Image (cartoon, rainbow, N blue to C red):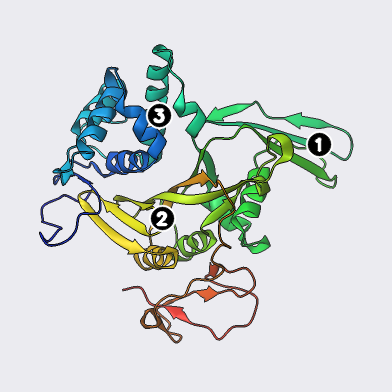
Amino acid sequence: VHGDNREYRMLSTPRIGVGLANPTGANNCFVNVVIQSLWHVEEFRKEMKSASSDGIMASLSAIFERMAGSEVDVVSPDPLRDDLSKVNPSRFLSGMMADATETYEEVLKHVQESLEAQGRVNLVRDFFEISLIEKSECSCGEKFQNEPSTSFVYRAYAAELNQVFFQTSQLEQLLQISSDINIAKCSDQSHQQSVMRTLTHVPEVFSLSIVWPPEPKTTQIIDIIGLLKPALILSEVFDLPNNHNLICNLVGMVCFYGNHYVAFTKDETDKWILLDDSLIKEVGEFNFLIEKLVKAKYQPVLLLYAQAKHVPPSPVRRVDLKPDLFRRWSASTIAVIPCDICGAWHSYHEKAYDLYIFMFF
């Protein structure tokens, strides 16, 4: 929601990206984070350069073209915003706030339709489409299968992740356990259930949506942030074609706080960049990203994982935040513990620690 009513950059500061306009009252942040997230998927951006279409695909292509201009610091998202309001006025009414993940899906859906109408190679399907089949089998022999599904995002629910958080602090395992809640099973709960979750189409970019309750507690936000690592082992969440192992690197993120969306992206040097409307600012390495998320209490709502072409370095096992962010116990603060067992940050843990407390400023 934040308006661009101040100058963010000093003239002497080297430009590290192109910002997007969000005048006061425009509420463009939800569409800005989508544009920035898609812009940083290089192959998708290249494909959009040759777009010859009307509607959403054409407006996105025009915005990308302006963002590529070497003399441009801030670009208006209005062409895409206007086209979104035309295809779905009740959801994307001009001047009103909307959901960033739903906007991401809407944009990809219309770009896919435009590519299909032109008979072109469907890069949207190759890069973003998730095709999933979920099955369960009971020890009594009864079998269940959910309807095959196709989507651009895989949704996980923060409340369900928090509910099973005590079982493990590895995101891959939590995604498995929480997803099992929604799969049809035998009515006799004493029976053993075997669940198989198969991706029949594995996208180049796996988009994980985290759906939050209206007013999450600070401890819930911290626990979810503590699950994030530089990579997601997708083959530990799903059964994949040919049973191959697959590691996906975290390359982008959309977060929400205070009725405002921001995006983060990783550059070619593995440094993270904050994309906050017209503000483009380097955050630094992954540990500094986590530090910023915790301090600002950002809620990750959309995580973009790109298939790794090679095995990356071992994921960061613990995050060292600056010492001045910690204080000893205070009744008005929230407990956060760096776990030596799993590498995540928790608001609690059974293992005894010299307890430190994170102070929110």
Residue 118 % position (x, y): 39, 13
Nearest the viewer among 69 and 147 is 69
Nearest the viewer among 197 and 27 is 197
Residue type, numbered disc 3 = Leu
Query: Which mark sits nearer the N-terminus, 1 or 3?
Result: 3
State yes or no: discs 2 and 1 in contact (Cβ < 8 Å): no
> Quick one: SS at disc 3?
helix
Residue in the picture at 14% in, 50% down: 4
Mark 2 crowd level (few <14, some 14–19, many ≥20, 10 Å Cα): many
Left of 110 or right of it: where is 64? Answer: left
Up-down: is 306 above or below 7?
above
Q: Residue furthest right?
A: 140
Nearest the viewer among 15 and 154 is 15
Mark 3 crowd level (few <14, some 14–19, many ≥20, 10 Å Cα): some
Q: Quadrant of residue 244?
A: top right
Residue 323 % position (x, y): 40, 82
Q: To which residue does mark 1 refer? A: 137
Q: CA distance from mark 3 to mark 2?
A: 23 Å
Q: Nearer the viewer, mark 1 or mark 3?
A: 3
